[in-house]
Image: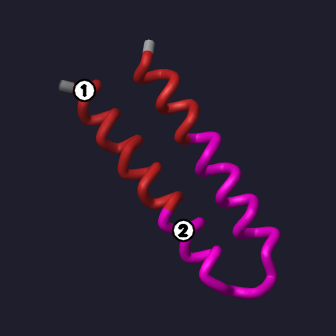
Amino acid sequence: MLRVIVVIQSLVIILLAVALLLSRKNFDSLNVVLIMMIVSQLLLLVYLIKLGNQ
């Protein structure tokens, strides 16, 4: 149950970060932070999926 909540939360964070990235015109340090957030959440999702498949 907890894994489902974490997956949903990760997807929401990824969607919000992507929406923020697409809405911003100029490239600055906030975009780097958003990209790092997306990558870290994707890594968490991959880890949870691998954990679930074992």
Q: Which mark is residue 25?
A: none
Q: Is residue 14 magenta?
A: yes
Look at mark 2 in the image and give the residue it sits on. Answer: 35
Seen from this angle, which residue lies furthest left? 54
Dot 2 lies on which element?
A: helix
Q: Is residue 1 above or below residue 21?
A: above
* Left or right placement of residue 3 versus residue 19 in this view: left
Instruction: Magenta stretch: give its range.
Output: 11-36
Q: Which mark is residue 53?
A: 1
Question: Looking at the figure, which quarter contains the C terminus?
Answer: top left
Three-letter code, disc 1? Asn
Task: Give percent across and percent down for residue 35.
Answer: 54, 68
| Residue positioned 75% across, 69% down in the render | 22
Mark 1 Cα within 10 Å, few/some/many (few <14, many 20+)? few
Seen from this angle, which residue lies furthest top? 1
Taking the spot 55% from the left edge, 76% from the top edge, the residue there is 32
Up-down relation of residue 19 to residue 31 (above or below): above
Residue 43 at x, y percent in the picture: 36, 51
- Side of 45 where 17 appears, left or right: right
Within 10 Å of disc 2 (Cα), the crowding (few <14, some 14-19, many 20+) is some
In the rendered image, the quadrant that contains the N terminus is top left
Work out whether 12 lies above or below 23: above
